[in-house]
Image (cartoon, grey):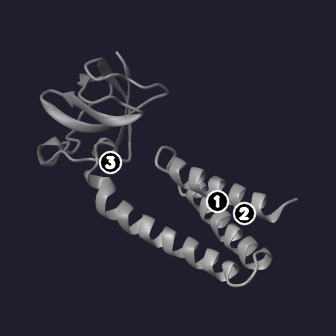
Amino acid sequence: MDPLLIYITLLLAGFILIGAEIFIPGGILGAVGAVAWVSAAVVGVRNFPEPWNFLSAFALLLAGLVTFAVWIKFFPKSPMGKALSLSADLRDQKANKTENLPVGTLGEAVSTLRPSGIAGFDGKRVDVVADGEWIEAGQPVKIASIRGGHITVVKA
C-alpha cells in the first residue's frame, strides 16, 4: 500500500477521532486519535525522503500543540463550548440534607432524575436517586427506600 495514502488516512482518522471526543467524552477516542497522529508521524519519518520525513513529523507535532493551545483558549468561549459546559451559578441549587423523611413520603422531582437529581419533600430539596427509570422534573415521586443516607424514589 502506498505510504502517502496510509499517512493521509492516519491524519484524517486522528483528526476525526479527536474531534469526536467533543461529543463522546471519555478519553478513548481522543487517545486513539492521538495514536493515529503519532503513527502518521512514524510513517512519514520512515517513508518520506530527507528532509521531508522529519519536517512532516515536526509539522504534526507543531500542529497538534498549536491546535491544543487554541482549543484551550477559545473553545470554552465559543457557542458550542458554552453549550457543553456549566455556566450557571448553582450556589442556591444545593439540596438539603436528609432530615428524618420516612419511606412513603410524597414529593415532586425538582430536576430530571437521570437517575439522580433533586426532589422536593415538605419544602426541602433533597438529593435522590430514581429506582429504575428517569423521572422528568415536576413529576410526583414517593420515597421507596432510605439506605445509608441514599434516598431512592419511584414515580408516585
Q: Which mark is residue 11?
A: 1
- Work out how far the residue at label 2 is from the one at label 1, CA to CA, in angstroms: 6 Å
Residue 5: quarter of image = bottom right
Q: Quadrant of the N terminus?
A: bottom right
The residue closer to the viewer here, 106 or 139, is: 139
Q: Which mark is residue 7?
A: 2
Q: Which mark is residue 87?
A: none
Please state the horizontal and vertical placement of residue 83, each as a whole percent of the image.
30, 41
- Work out how far the residue at label 1 is from the one at label 3, CA to CA, in angstroms: 24 Å
The amino acid beneath tag 3 is: Gly
What residue is pinned by disc 3?
Answer: 81
Badge 1, how many Cα within 10 Å: few under 14, some, many 20+? many
- Work out how far the residue at label 2 is from the one at label 3, CA to CA, in angstroms: 31 Å
Q: Foreground mark, 2 or 3?
A: 2
Q: Is residue 125 above or below residue 26?
A: above
Q: Is residue 153 above or below residue 98?
A: above
Mark 2 or mark 3, which has the lower sequence index? 2
The amino acid beneath tag 2 is: Tyr
Q: Are marks 2 and 1 in contact (CB under 8 Å)?
A: yes
Q: Residue at x 65, y 71 (%)?
A: 38
Q: Are marks 2 and 3 in contact (CB under 8 Å)?
A: no
The amino acid beneath tag 1 is: Leu
Residue 75: quarter of image = bottom left
Q: Residue at x 70, y 79 (%)?
A: 53
Q: Residue at x 62, y 57 (%)?
A: 14
Please state the horizontal and vertical placement of residue 126, each as a whole percent of the image.
24, 37
Query: Which residue is farthest right?
Result: 1
Question: SS for tag 1?
Answer: helix
Query: Along the horizontal axis of the image, is 47 left or right of 141?
Result: right
Badge 2, how many Cα within 10 Å: few under 14, some, many 20+? many
Question: SS for tag 3?
Answer: helix
